[in-house]
Image: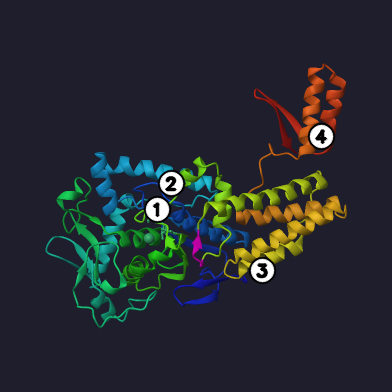
Amino acid sequence: MGLKFFNTLTRSVQEFAPLDPAGKKVGMYCCGPTVHDFAHIGNFRTFVFADLVRRYLEFKGCAVQHVMNITDVEDKIIKRTREAGVSCKEYTAKYEAEFFKDFDALACKRPHHTPRATEHVAEIMLLIEKLIARGVAYKTADGSVYFSIEKYRGCGCQYGQLVKLNFDEMRPGERVSSDEYEKESVADFALWKARVPEDGDVFWPSPWGEGRPGWHIECSAMSMKILGPSFDLHLGGEDLIFPHHEDEIAQSEGATGKPFVKYWLHGAHLMVEGKKMSKSLGNFFTLRDLLAKGYTGREIRYLLLTAHYRESFNFTLEGLASSRVSLARLDECLAKLRECAGTINAAPDVALFEKFSTALDDDLNVSAAWGTMFEWVRETNRLLVEKKLSPQQAASALTAWQKIDSVFGIGGKAEAEAPTEIVALLEQREAARKARDFKHADALRDELKAKSWVIEDTPKGPRLKKI
Ligand code: AMP
Ligand code: ZN
C-alpha cells in the first residue's frame, strides 16, 4: 500500500503489509492510560499519535480494530485510593471519565475496544497458568508468580527483541516485583503479586492465593483476547519499550509460541525545557490547564500533530500561540474557498491529495504534509486575489481538504465564523427587520442564500449556517 513505518522490532523503516492476506483488516493496540490522575498533554501526544496512525490507515482503506486498555489497578492507583478513602472503582471511574473528556476534546477517535484490567482478571489468570504449564513462570513462597527469563531463553525464545540486553551480569532467579525498572536491573518480573496489607481490599482469589495482576500481563491478556495471538501494530510512548513491551512479547510468545506483533511503533516524548513532561518532574500541563488559559483542543491537537512522532518535541505556550496563527490562516483560506465554490460539488484535487499521501506514506511525515498544506494555502490565496480560481477548482480543493482532514482531524472553524461580508449581510438584515422593512430583510435573506448561507432564528438570536 506504499505506507512505511519505523518498526522498533527491526530498527528499520519497513513497508507496512498487514497480516490479513487481503491486506484490509488491521489489528492495532495502543497502551492506554493509568487512571490515577488527570492525564497530561505528554500522555496525549502518544494518544494523538495513535489516532493519526488509525486515521491514516482508514484513509488508506484499511478496516482498523483499535484497542486501548485502561490500567485501573496498579501500585500508584492503590496508594491514591487509600489516601482518598474511596473504593478503587470509584476512584478510577472518575479519572477514566475525565480522560475521555480530554480525549474527545482533542478529537481522537474512540477506540473500538477500551478493556479495563480489573474486568479481565480471569483472562490474566488463564494466561499465567499457561505460562506456568509451559515451564516459563513459577510461583514463589509468598504466593506471587514470576516470569522466568532463564527458562524462556532456554526454550530458544529471545528476551531482548526491542532492546539490546547484557545477560552476563544477570543472576538466574533474581526477581523484580515493581512494574517499572531499568534495563540494567533486568530480572524475572512479576505476573501476579501476592496480596500485602497495603493493598486493602484490592485483591482477587487465584490458584496461587489472593493477589492482583502485574502491569505487563494485562496488556498481553487483553490484546490477545481481542486481536488474537498475532496482530499487526502495537503502539505506545518510547518509555514503554523496556520493560513493558519487552515483557509483553515474552509473556505472549511464551504462552502461544507464535510471533506476537509484526510492527512496534513508539512515539517520542513531549518535552519541557529539554526534560520529559512527567508527573514526577512536576513540569506538566493537563489539557484543562491549557483550556483554562483560553486555548482550544483543536489548537493543542494541531500543535501535537506538527512534529514527527519519532522526534522529541519541546512544548511551549509560544508554540501554541503560533498554532493559533497557522490555523487562522488555514481557516481564512477555507472560508474564501467555500465562498468561491458556492454549492458546487467536485471530485478532490488529485495533485493536493497525492502530495499529502506521499508525505504521510513516508513514516507519517507530518512536517512535509503540513508544508504541502501551507504551500497550497499560499498559492490558493494568490489565485483567489487574482480571481483565477473557478468555483469548480475551489470545490475540488475543498473536497481534497475534507479527505485530508479525515486524517488530521482539525476540522474547519464552526459556522459562527462566517466571513465578514456574510456577517455584514446578516447585520443589515437584522437592522431592516427592526426598521420593519420586511421587503429589504427578505431580499437580504435571499442574497445570503445565494451565497450558501441560511439564517436560523434561535432563542439566542439569528445564527448563520452554511448550506
Ligand atoms: P501512563 O498513563 O503513565 O501509563 O501513560 C500513558 C501513555 O503516555 C504511555 O504510552 C506513555 O508512554 C505516554 N507518555 C508518558 N509521558 C509522555 C510524554 N512526556 N510524552 C509522550 N508520551 C508520554
Ligand atoms: Zn501496555
The label shown at residue 449 is 4
Question: Is 48 a magenta residue?
Answer: no
| Magenta part of the chain | 310-314
What amino acid is labelled 2 in the image?
Phe
The label shown at residue 99 is 2
- Identify the secondary structure beneath mark 4: helix
State whether label 3 is within 8 Å of ligand 1: no
Q: Position of residue 328 (x, y in %)?
A: 67, 48
**Is 397 on the left-hand or right-hand side of 246?**
right
What amino acid is labelled 3 in the image?
Thr
Lower position in the chain sequence, tag 1 or tag 4:
1
- Identify the secondary structure beneath mark 3: helix
Q: Quadrant of the C terminus?
A: top right
What amino acid is labelled 1 in the image?
Pro
- Count of labels in the image: 4
Q: Are marks 3 and 1 in contact (CB under 8 Å)?
A: no
Lower position in the chain sequence, tag 3 or tag 2:
2
Q: Residue furthest bottom?
A: 168
* Applied colour scheme: rainbow
Q: Which residue is mark 1?
A: 33
